[in-house]
Amino acid sequence: WAEAAAIYRYPINAAVCVPKAGARVMPGTIDVAGYALASGEPGTSIERVEVSADGGRTWTDAKLHGPQQAFCWRLWNAQLAVDRATSRLTVRATDSRGHVQPREAPWNLKGYLYNAWHHVPVEVSG
């Protein structure tokens, strides 16, 4: 818990914001949305965001919104097919330098710079 140096560079990261964790959704096509942030290297921006309903076995490209700028969040959304076998939604991002959000990342006590694929649990019913 000792004081640490300031964080000036950060790893690529993306998150699902819609639907919220634990949401109940109907089988079929749903809207998934969130944000992505490129690595902290100067001149780097978000190039691609992909979402998955099957734990990363298959991916669907998301539509990126807003200007492509360094050091800025990039909003995204996608239409994603889900069925009763879907238990979570997953997102990963790629930036303009080719950095891809990793499947796994080292854990640390404060959670700093954690950037593994983001997962959101959902319940598909109806």
Image: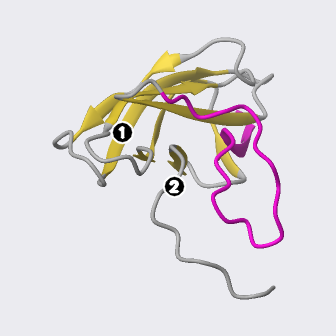
Choose top left, top right, bottom left or bottom right for residue 61.
Answer: top left
> Looking at the image, which is closer to me, 63 or 46?
46
Relative to 77, 24 lies left or right = right
Residue at image position (60%, 55%) is 20
Q: Main secondary structure of the magenta part?
A: loop
Frontmost of labels 1 and 2 is: 2
Residue closest to the far left? 67
Magenta stretch contains residue 47: no
User: Which secondary structure, mark 1?
Assistant: strand
Counting from the top left corner in percent of width and height, residue 115 is at 64, 48
Q: Is residue 99 above or below residue 25?
A: above
Q: Which residue is mark 2?
A: 10
Q: Residues within 10 Å of mark 2 (few under 14, many from 20)?
A: some
Relative to 24, 31 lies left or right = left
What mark, if any, has residue 76 been given in the picture?
A: 1
Q: Residues within 10 Å of mark 1 (few under 14, many from 20)?
A: many
